[in-house]
Image (spheres, rainbow, N blue to C red):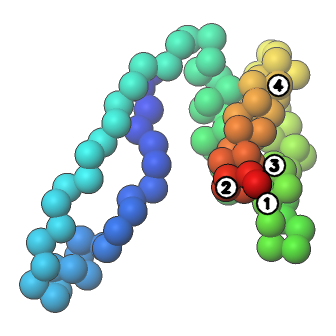
Amino acid sequence: MWVTGGRQEGPDPVEAAGLGVIVPEPEVQIFDIHPDAEKGIRMFLKCCTQWRVSDGQRIGLDYGVVLALLSLEGEPNPGEVLEDVQVMEDAALAKLAGPTA
């Protein structure tokens, strides 16, 4: 399995073209995923819009949604995949929080 990721930083190429500005193509990073991590990564990507928010800050994923998707997909080991998702959730929350003092 391979994954591309990240959000495009900078101006929208279509908007820039309307102003006569040429925006170079962003560099795409492609990398391999270990088969043992594939289910967790796929589930995290499916749930990455399902954040619980408090006071404008992400506080964690909505596990009800994660578990519902695991059930819909007939995942035989939902607890194992959920643990993998939680590792990525923790890393994402740390990254989204920015540098610490």
90, above or below 19, in the image:
above
- For the residues carrying marks 2 and 3, which lies nearer the camera in this image? 2
Question: Quarter of the image holding residue 28?
Answer: top left
Q: Residues within 10 Å of mark 1 (few under 14, many from 20)?
A: some
Q: Please report the residue visible at 44 percent of the width from the left and 32 percent of the height from the top.
A: 3
The span from disc 2 to disc 3 (Cα, nearest Å) is 18 Å
Amino acid tagged 3: Leu
Mark 3 secondary-structure assignment: strand
The span from disc 4 to disc 1 (Cα, nearest Å) is 19 Å
Q: Is residue 72 visible?
A: no
Mark 2 secondary-structure assignment: loop
Q: Earlier in the sequence, mark 2 or mark 3?
A: 3
- For the residues carrying marks 3 and 1, which lies nearer the camera in this image? 1
Q: Earlier in the sequence, mark 4 or mark 1?
A: 1
Q: Is residue 34 left or right of residue 37?
A: left
Is the C-beta separation of discs 4 and 1 under 8 Å?
A: no
Q: Please report the residue visible at 82 percent of the width from the left and 18 percent of the height from the top.
A: 80
62, above or below 57, in the image:
above
Q: Please report the residue visible at 39 percent of the width from the left and 25 percent of the height from the top.
A: 31
Q: Nearer the viewer, residue 77 or 57?
A: 57
Q: Earlier in the sequence, mark 2 or mark 4?
A: 4
- Give the image location of residue 41, x and y in percent: 62, 30
Residue 98: mark in rendering: 2
Q: Residues within 10 Å of mark 2 (few under 14, many from 20)?
A: few
Residue corresponding to mark 4: 83
Amino acid tagged 2: Gly
Residue corresponding to mark 3: 61
The span from disc 2 to disc 4 (Cα, nearest Å) is 23 Å
Is the C-beta separation of discs 3 and 4 under 8 Å?
A: no
The span from disc 3 to disc 1 (Cα, nearest Å) is 8 Å
Residue corresponding to mark 1: 58
